[in-house]
Image (cartoon, coloured by chain):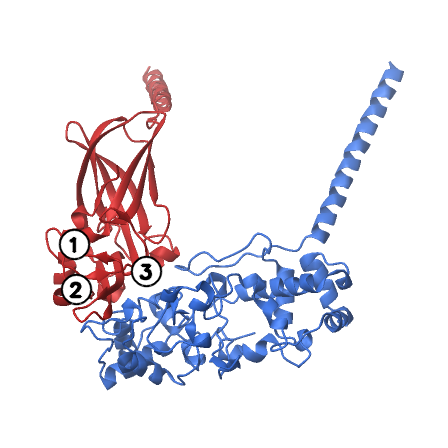
Chain colours: A red, B blue
Amino acid sequence: MKKQLIFKLIGLFVIGQFLGSCKKDITPIYQAPNTNLKINWTHSIDGVPLTMDTIMYVNQSGSNYSVTRCQYYLSGFELTKLDGSKTKLEGIVYGDARQETHEIKFNGFPAGTYTGIEFLIGLAPEQNISNSLESTEGNINMAWPDVIGGGYHFLKFEGYYLDTANLKKGFTMHIGTNDMLIHHQKISFSFTVNENENSTINLNMNLNEWFKNPYTYNFNTDGNYTMAIPTLMTLLKNNGSDVFSIKE
Amino acid sequence: MEAMYLALKNKTILLGLMVLLAASCKKNETQQTEKTYPTPYSLTIPKGFPQPVLYADNPLTEEGILLGKMLYGDSILSTNGRACISCHQPALSFSSPMYHSWNGFHYSVPPHINLAFKKAYNWDGSQGCLDTLAMGDFAPEFFNANYDGLVQKLKAHPIYPSLFNKAFGVIDLNQLSYTELKRDIAYSIGQYLRTKISSNSKFDQYRRKEVLLDNNEYEGYVIFFSEKGDCFHCHGEPLFSDQEYHNNGLGDTYIGYDQGRTMVTNKEEDLGKFYTPTLRNIEQTAPYMHDGRLKTLEEVVEFYNSGVKDEVHVDPLMTKTNGTKNLNLTPLEKMQLVAFLRTLTDKTYSTY
């Protein structure tokens, strides 16, 4: 009798396990929505498409300048829903104003109507770690050496300007380290992402915004070199929060 | 019934024979394939290095690399006794101890090191492909080669005809035009040079936590990779070259080869810009700068410390903290920077 009970218990246990495993097998697999979003962007200076290497621009403080380099990272993209909640889009993209096209693609996020987009210029601390990005030429040259903190440059903005004596001088506006991460403000506009459709957002970086709002940066009085000078990097960081806008 | 059995048996035998025949055909086909195509070769890429620049029309093969290695060291390519290693001496990281003259201008011989990762060649970047780089060396000022003599010498060689066949399927060297012959030679040398990868300097070992730097080397490392020396923007890890073109303030007159990148682009903004050389094995690759004007590492450090000319074409990166173009290093700091540069020597590299 006792033996029979033991056999019955073992039998029940085996059946239970079997049913359990069956249940596991039939758990529905989550299928991400078939949404596709491409973000393109361009570079300009006060509405004029950027031309590299020519002193033809004037910044807010009145300095004539040219751009020889503008390289940066964009990451931490977030879309704002109608109810104010955020949809995170994972991805890091390296930008180089000398390149002709710039884009990043996202997919598999909820469809719906959104009211804006925000992102980081630079890399979040968990991503800003030396050698964590693929060893492409761009990433290699954006490395921020370990002896000065490690990680990557968030921005390299270089060129020439004419000083107060009208002499041509170089400027190097570099930003890096976690304290200098730029949270770009929300760019507000309404757009709808539908499933099984391709959506596109077109943005533009106005490079002159790096030199104004809130601080009018002056090469002659503030300096033409931000490296290892956190106070100057902070001025650019604050100015950088609105350098992008929607491209009409 | 018996007839049916025999018929079936015969069919089975026939089928078996057909399978065997098909298998044997397949085997022959395989043998032919093995005979025709060279053995693929795969590069081992050190951690942190970028992907190598490879081209589909010149895949790396063991036979191509061997042919390239042999030709690289062989004066058979020239009529004047020169070989590639005459100017790219293995003991000097495949560079030359003196500058060379060309059209009245001096230029130093770039070392052949980690070329697999380079995207342009020559100081002005006038060559964009490693595979065809050596084709220019047959000119009178280098090998002074001639087609007939070259083909004759190669055909008479006990190994080269077979290697050309295995590497590139060349049945008879006579059937190649001079351009085709130079191309195959250059392709094989390009293959060989891609295998010359250096990643075992003392500094590499330090980064892999295998050795320690001494105090001066470490302080030099800090100077190099901080704004104090500000070397890293153009000479960062792992290649110690940003693969870009810079005017580093050597001069204020730009004539002939000193025009640099402008000679290729015809753009005024490229005046005096040269391809950033690697600093790997820099201790072995004097003289320095594109024209070989500096003889020692001490002279190089002093140039960046106090000799950069404040000229309108100088790269913005040459601007330093104090607004000038000087580093203002102390004698101790300069010595430490040189000590660090010497840690970039890979003593296991300079073997041919």
| Chain at numbered mark 2 | A
Type of residue at label 3? Asp
Measured as percent of width and height from the top left, residue B250 is found at 35, 78
Q: Which mark is residue A127?
A: none
C-alpha distance separating marks 1 and 2: 16 Å
Q: Which mark is residue A53?
A: 3
Q: Which residue is mark 2?
A: A219
Does B143 sit above or below residue A110? below
Give the left or right position of residue A231, taking residue A16 as reference.
left
Q: In which quadrant of the rendered image does the N terminus of chain B lie? A: top right
**Crowding near the residue tagged with mark 3, few <14, some 14–19, many ≥20 C-alpha atoms within 10 Å:** some
Check chain identity for marks 1 and 2: say if they share one.
Answer: yes
Earlier in the chain: of badge 3 and badge 2, it is 3
**Crowding near the residue tagged with mark 1, few <14, some 14–19, many ≥20 C-alpha atoms within 10 Å:** many
Measured as percent of width and height from the top left, residue B152 is found at 77, 71
The answer to whether any part of residue B241 appears in the image is: no
Q: Which residue is mark 1?
A: A237
Type of residue at label 2? Phe
| Chain at numbered mark 3 | A
Q: Secondary structure at mark 3?
A: loop
C-alpha distance separating marks 3 and 2: 18 Å
Whether pointer 3 and pointer 2 mark residues with C-beta atoms closer than 8 Å, the reply is no
Q: In which quadrant of the rendered image does the C terminus of chain B lie? A: bottom right
Image point (26%, 50%), residue name:
A127
Q: Secondary structure at mark 1?
A: helix
Front residue (pair B243, B270): B270
Measured as percent of width and height from the top left, residue A135 is found at 38, 55
Measured as percent of width and height from the top left, residue A185 is found at 16, 43
